Image (cartoon, rainbow, N blue to C red):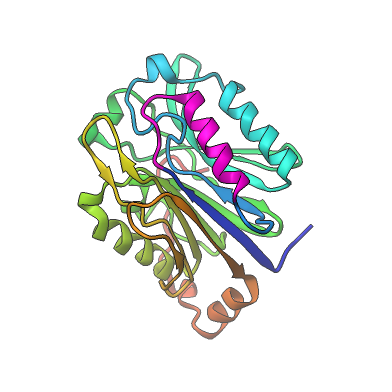
Amino acid sequence: MNVAELHVAIVQANLLWEDINGNISRLSDMIDNIKGTPHIIILPEMFTTGFSMNASQLAEEPNGKTYRWMVEISKFKGFALCGSFMVCEGGRFYNRFHFVTPGGNLFIYDKRHLFSYANEHTVFTPGEHRLVFEYLGWRIMPQICYDVRFPVWFRNRGDYDLLINVASFPETRRDIWRTLLKARAIENQCFVAAANRAGDDELGLHYAGDSMLINAVGEPVAEILPSAEGIVQSIFIKDELAELRKQFPVLLDADEFKVEGEY
């Protein structure tokens, strides 16, 4: 089934520190309160633990508790569910984005650009592959938090319509977060759905959230009040995107290039 109008909802939550069961419970309650019937629901980065480096204690097997919860919720509710959490596979740890569909399909992306400022690169293994997948006729590219600073890896070659970013972006860099998201929408002529967490973590960081849904000219069409928990949702219309690209075809003038690690 293809849809011309894609209903997207973002859950902006104050995540509990390193509490997988507690976060799953709270997120389940928030999902239950979403109005309407969205096609996709987006959760923040490391939505079961907060942005912790304690992977040796918290990382799950690929088919572990959190993945099974996502499958159950998606199948029961009838929407795709996505976000990132820690995974241990082959003796390595990954900050892995999961996109689970009601039909049981799974698309995964491992965070490419690890946040060395917080020593993420000493714990997790970076992703090697750029990912674009299709859902309901929409071509989707996922990225995780810090990835938003590195546009080359995510440059649109005319191969995607929606960029999803799941994040733990602190309030101290709030303006940077908002600016980069708008820039990615403009330069790639794509819709952007960005899910950030809210609240405080055990490291003393405060997160304003600023989760947003952005159109292809960089304008937020829906956003949530800073620092608050809640849901933000809107509808992206494919014909609007097609018309913009037809009337102002900047992607046709983009440079050809290849990045190491692509396939």
Q: Nearer the viewer, residue 218 or 255?
A: 218
Q: Please tell me whether residue 255 belongs to the stretch shown in magenta.
A: no
Q: Residue at x 42, y 40 (%)?
A: 45
Percent of width and height locating residue 42: 53, 48
Q: Residue at x 54, y 85 (%)?
A: 247
Percent of width and height locating residue 6: 64, 63
83 is higher (above) or lower (below) than 67:
below
Q: Residue at x 69, y 33 (%)?
A: 72
Q: Residue at x 67, y 33 (%)?
A: 71
204 is higher (above) or lower (below) than 235:
above
- Any part of residue 98 in sight: no
> Relative to residue 14, is residue 118 drawn left or right?
left
Q: Nearer the viewer, residue 93 or 6?
A: 6
Q: Please tell me whether residue 27 belongs to the stretch shown in magenta.
A: yes
Q: Nearer the viewer, residue 259 or 184?
A: 184
Q: Nearer the viewer, residue 94 or 68?
A: 68
Counting every numbered tag in the picture gives 0
47 is higher (above) or lower (below) than 63:
below
Percent of width and height locating residue 4: 70, 69
> Relative to residue 219, is residue 204 drawn left or right?
left
Range drawn in magenta: 14-33
Residue sitting farthest toward the bottom: 247
- Any part of residue 245 in sight: yes
